[in-house]
Image (spheres, rainbow, N blue to C red):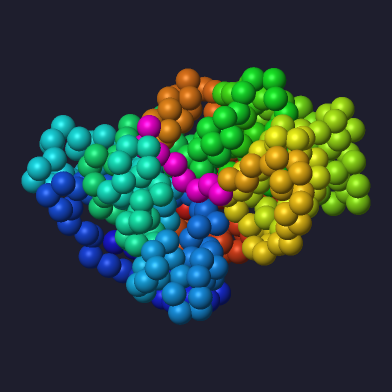
């Protein structure tokens, strides 16, 4: 099979196209022919070493073992089943829950042995992948490309909304609202939980498209008076912030939150380190949440909402698998709306 391997920490030249044997499923696994794999910050930061030191970076303390096939947002068809797997699964179109864990129900994502496909296991930048049968779920949509964009970004966005206990009528600021997680934060907060969303993006040319996702107001982070802009359009402080940017908008986020407000972050594309005046935290009674991925039950609730049409795929562009380097470079450019997807069969 064709596959893209990360050969070590570094730039996109560490992504190499190779020919490998098709993997064999274990007793409790299935072999999936990959039809689409969406790109996430996760595999880029893994390659760049952003999750740890130069010598050890990954979801686990020991770091990634190279070479590794990245990719975690996977949709495809089951073509072979292991000895202990019901053979009726063969032929099913599925999306993959993206990690294994021994954590009990509701704590899978925070278990110490949580291991991620594309980091601890070979992932979706390939034509085939093996995965535990019980972590494969029916595709929520009929189209492979559209179904592939939700597993990681969607579950992360869904978990963020549940963490802050989003409710109808509250106001939520969503940063990075044109990105993979951010565009889903807008949809889930507004169309599933009924909140009013103030979306923060860079290029205001995307305003109408972001409003179509459910945003009430769209503002640019380039504004020299962003905090004032947010307070003006909302008529006062906001209830919560769902953030994927990090340092660049952290101070603004805390400034616009009401007393008792909530800040939830799942990314740091705008800076991984920040200054925090603890007086802001305790005098405003703020709650800070760190968030990534989610639980199997949240994953199921998300898939149900997608199948009911409450959440729609937002896709900026597709690339053939062989152009993984170009796709990751494009992924990091500003001005996009939604996900970038690799297609093995193009």
Judge left or right: residue 233 versus residue 250.
Answer: right
**Residue 305 at x, y = what percent?**
48, 25
**Residue 180 at x, y = what percent?**
59, 45
Residue found at x 36% / y 51%: 111
Query: What secondary structure characterizes most of the magenta part?
Result: loop
129 drawn magenta? no
State the residue lying farthest toward the left.
83
Judge left or right: residue 202 versus residue 15.
Answer: right
Q: Is residue 282 visible?
A: yes
The total of numbered circles placed on residues is: 0
77 above or below 88?
below
Judge left or right: residue 3 versus residue 50.
Answer: left
**Residue 319 at x, y = what percent?**
52, 54
**On the image, which quarter does residue 80 sit in?**
top left
216 above or below 100?
above
Q: Quadrant of the N terminus?
A: bottom left
Judge left or right: residue 161 versus residue 344.
Answer: right
254 above or below 123?
above
Name the residue nearer the viewer: 187 or 337.
Answer: 187
Residue found at x 74% / y 62%: 275
Residues in magenta, as a range: 290-297
Q: Is residue 209 visible?
A: no
Residue found at x 51% / y 78%: 54
**On the image, which quarter does residue 209 sit in?**
top right
Residue found at x 23% / y 36%: 91
**Residue 71 at x, y = what percent?**
42, 56
């Amino acid at each position: 099979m064709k596959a893209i391997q990360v050969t070590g920490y570094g730039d996109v030249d560490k992504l190499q196209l190779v020919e490998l044997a098709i993997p064999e499923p274990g007793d409790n696994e299935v072999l999936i022919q990959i039809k689409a794999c969406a790109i996430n910050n996760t595999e880029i930061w893994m390659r760049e070493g952003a999750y740890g030191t130069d010598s050890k970076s990954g979801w686990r303390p020991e770091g990634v073992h190279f070479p590794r096939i990245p990719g975690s947002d996977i949709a495809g068809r089951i073509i072979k089943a292991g000895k202990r797997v019901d053979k009726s699964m063969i032929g099913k179109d599925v999306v993959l829950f993206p990690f294994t864990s021994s954590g009990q129900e509701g704590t899978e994502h925070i278990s110490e042995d949580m291991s991620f496909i594309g980091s601890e296991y070979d992932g979706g930048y390939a034509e085939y992948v093996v995965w535990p049968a019980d972590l494969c779920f029916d595709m929520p949509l009929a189209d492979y490309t559209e179904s592939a964009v939700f597993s990681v970004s969607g579950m992360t966005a869904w978990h963020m909304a549940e963490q802050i206990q989003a409710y109808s009528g509250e106001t939520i600021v969503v940063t990075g609202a044109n990105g993979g997680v951010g565009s889903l934060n807008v949809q889930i907060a507004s169309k599933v939980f009924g909140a009013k969303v103030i979306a923060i993006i860079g290029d205001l040319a995307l305003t109408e498209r972001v409003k179509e996702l459910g945003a009430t107001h769209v503002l640019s982070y380039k504004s020299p008076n962003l905090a004032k802009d947010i307070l003006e359009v909302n008529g006062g402080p906001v209830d919560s912030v769902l953030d994927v940017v990090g340092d660049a908008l952290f101070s603004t986020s805390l400034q616009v939150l009401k007393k008792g407000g909530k800040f939830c972050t799942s990314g740091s594309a705008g800076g991984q380190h920040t200054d925090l005046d603890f007086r802001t935290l305790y005098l405003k009674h703020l709650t800070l949440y760190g968030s990534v991925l989610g639980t199997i039950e949240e994953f199921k609730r998300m898939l149900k909402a997608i199948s009911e049409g409450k959440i729609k795929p937002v896709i900026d562009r597709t690339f053939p698998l062989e152009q993984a380097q170009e796709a990751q470079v494009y992924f990091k450019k500003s001005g996009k709306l939604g996900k970038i997807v690799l297609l093995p069969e193009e």
